[in-house]
Amino acid sequence: MGEKRTSSGFLLKQRAFLKLYLITLTEQERLYGLKLLDVLRQEFKPYGYKPNHSEVYKALHDLIEDGILKQVKQKKEGMKYQEVVYYRFADGGYEKAKLYKRQLKAELDRCEALIRKAIQDNYS
């Protein structure tokens, strides 16, 4: 996690995009996996993007492996035995998340400039 993100040369990869949003959603409130998926799908529905289940969970697992998030199991409200896995920041994970977001901001700015250039060059 300490190494600098390197650009892919084209646009941002889907997993990096999802990790950014998963970090932000974790900053806002504690959510469990399926709720995160629902929130992301609602958020991006107007743009025709529907993140799939496996990509969201792969991004969550990457964040756990990077030491940013951890899983916390809690009994589901009103249920005696059913547990839900919530995601929270790991010890030191919030600082790592801030670093990741700063690095990704630079990459997003580069991608935005590339898209603006394509629009200007081809539709002006």
Image (cartoon, helix red, strand yellow):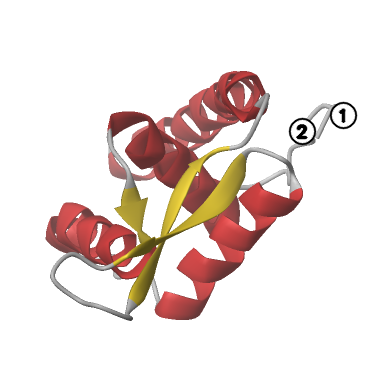
Looking at the image, residue 11 lies above or below residue 32: above
| Residue 85 image position (x, y, % from top left) | 43, 64
Please, what secondary structure does the residue beneath circle 2 have? loop
Q: In the image, which is nearer the foreground, mark 2 or mark 1?
A: 1
Q: Which quarter shows the N terminus?
A: top right
Q: Is residue 80 visible?
A: yes
- Pinpoint residue 13: horizontal percent, then vertical percent: 59, 54
Amino acid of disc 2: Arg
Question: Which of 122/89 is in front?
Answer: 89
Which residue is at a point 32% across and 43% down the rendered structure image? 30
- Up-down: is 24 above or below 80? above
Distance (Cα) linking label 2 and label 1: 6 Å
Residue bearing the label numbered 2: 5
The residue tagged with tag 1: helix, strand or loop?
A: loop
Please identify the quadrant where the C terminus is shown.
top left
- Residue type at the position of mark 1: Glu
Q: Position of residue 7 (x, y in %)?
A: 74, 38
Cβ atoms at labels 2 and 1 below 8 Å apart: yes
- Residue 12 in view: no
Q: What residue did someone put label 1 on?
A: 3
In terms of image quadrants, where is residue 92? top right
Q: Position of residue 74 (x, y in %)?
A: 38, 60
Dot 1 crowding, Cα within 10 Å, few <14, some 14–19, many 20+: few
- Which residue shows up at 85% across the image and 27% down it? 2
